[in-house]
Structure formats: structure tokens, C-alpha cells
Amino acid sequence: MTAAASFTVVPSGAALGAEICGVDLTRIDDATFQALHKVWLEHMLLLFRGQKFVPEDLVTLVKRFGTPVTSSTLHKRDLSERTANQVFQLPPEVTVVTNIRENGKPVGILGDGEVVWHSDFSFKDKPTAARMLLAVEIPPAGGHTYFTNCYAAYDTMSDDMKRRIAGKTIKQADIIDTAMKLRPGASLDMDIRNVPGPSHPIISTHPETGRNMIFLGRRHGAYVNGMSLEDSEALLNELWAHTTQQRFVYEHEWQQGDVVVWDNRATLHKRDAFNSDSRRILYAAQVEGHKPYEAPDALKLPPHTRYAVAA
């Protein structure tokens, strides 16, 4: 436990994450935010318990991290079927993650089933950077969210594997969403090599910390450029198995009033299913990111310190 500025940092004890105590996020000044941002880059995920937020407070917070982007802008398609912003009278910067239905139709995203490992909007040229959730209503059981440290995944690889993946890129085709549902117009019979999608380097250098991460995005709809389908699948399976090991994972059990802010560039996350008879409402917001890149001297860069300290 360490003190920073006017707050206390309590590391999670896992490979990433820290709880911040003594902060009301609706009242932070610029100096406090700068101190929080430095801690965020170190821990990749910050938890603030018991926050008394209205939706506009989430918008104010996300704007401190950068330029907010709406889910509609990121998807570049009509999301008029999602009526949660009207139901809850929310600003456009806020997306609703919920299983609530009106007239038999979902009003938000992701329902109550399992959500598989992914990073948000990896199927865009510029995936989001900071991503945050506010817990509004939480079911009595289930719905936990898990985060994995992608710095640690890279740093613990053998030198041979690092050299093997150096310079390689993964195409991220938007075929299946994280709830394992086909996107409109997509088919499982598509040859992934011919499906449009941006390519991102497997070794991704963080633009702020200058350290390397493994960038996997999403397992389904992924293809390692220049390889046979069989070799691509084998390498992806190996990378995913390594990156999602339990030793790299932090599990978050939600409480009402939680605000969790994570670095989408340096992590993957997933969610447990929960009882469909329970209500779960979280408000989400995100910040515009950068086009991932591998630094020219990537193989010579030092490791990120967070996992080494936790281990």
C-alpha cells in the first residue's frame, strides 16, 4: 500500500490492477488526475469503489483521458436497435452493458451470457485506449470480469518466441462478436484470408510507457498474415494459451458504485455468464486510441515492471 498525492494505492495482489482509496472522482483536480494517470499506466487497471456517479460524471472522467468515442462511431453502423440511451436518458458518449429487455428486445449490449477474451474494438485501425465501466446494478452472483496483463505475456516469452513473432501482424476481421454471435452479413464459411480487416503487430509497443505488449485482439476472425491457415491457427492457439494463463489474470467481482478504468491497449478481458433473471446494468465509455505499432528496437526494450513486482 502506497500513498500518491491525496490518495492511496492498494495493488490487487494479482498480475495487474490496483484499488484507489480516498478519491471522489467527481471532485479531482488536474494535479490529482495526472498522479492517477501515472499510477494507471503502471497498474493497467484502477478500481474506485463506492463512487456516487451520474452519467455526466462518467463523460467528464473519460474526457480527462482523451477524446471520447461513441459505440456508434466505432461500429460505423446503425445501432438504433439499442434503445438504452433513451431508456436511461444518457449522453451519446455512454454505452449501456445490460441484459434488460423492453418489449422482448435487448436495449443494450452483451446480455447475460459469457463474453470471451478480447480487447475492445481491436477490429478497428485505432482500437480504443482507456476503457471504463460504472456499475449501476449488479446481480447477486456471476458476471465477474477478468483482465489479463499483456505486458507480462510478452515479457515471460522465450527469446526464441519473441524473435519468431517479431515483425508479424494479425489481421482482425469483424466476423463474430465477443458474445460469440455472428456479425450481420458474416459467415463461418468465409476464408479469413480474404475477409477485410485491419492488421496489427503481435508485438505492440505502448506509446506512453515505451514497453512491449502482446496484441491479440480477438481469437475468432484472426489470421497471422503470410502464414498458411494451419500454421496461423497453431501460432494463434499457442499465443492465446500463453497470454491467458491464470498467473497473468486479475478477477473483478463487481459492487454497485464501482468505477473500473483499464488500459485496453495492454490488456484482454472477458466476463462470466450470470442468471438471466437478474438485472445487470453497467455504463461504459472509451477513449480514442492509436494505430498499434512495433518499435524498430522492440526486442531490445526493457520489461514493464508491474508483473515483476507482483510475481
Image (cartoon, rainbow, N blue to C red):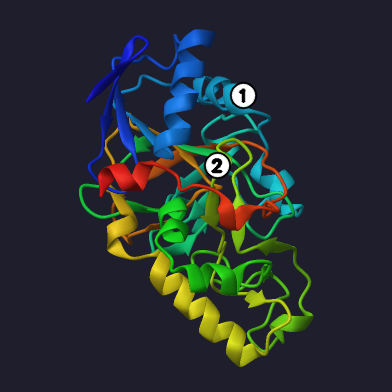
Q: How many labels were placed on the picture? A: 2
**Residue 92 position in % (x across, y down):** 65, 33
Tell me which corner region of the image, top left, top right, bottom left or bottom right, holds residue 52: top left
**Residue at point 51%, 17% (across, down):** 34
State the image coordinates of residue 100 (x, y, percent, origin top left).
43, 50
Residue at image position (44%, 22%) is 36
Q: Residues within 10 Å of mark 1 (few under 14, many from 20)?
A: some
| SS at circle 2 | helix
Q: CA distance from mark 2 to mark 1?
A: 21 Å
Please give left or right for residue 240 compared with residue 122 in the image: left
Residue placed most toward the observer, 163 or 116:
163
Look at label 2 and name its amino acid. Answer: Ala
In the image, what residue occupies the spot 38% across and 33% down? 46
Q: Is residue 285 above or below residue 126?
A: above
Numbered label attached to residue 84: 2
Residue type for callout 1: Lys
- In primary-sequence order, the first of circles 2 and 1 is 1
Give the number of the mark in front: 2 or 1.
Answer: 1
Taking the image as drawn, is residue 134 in sight? no
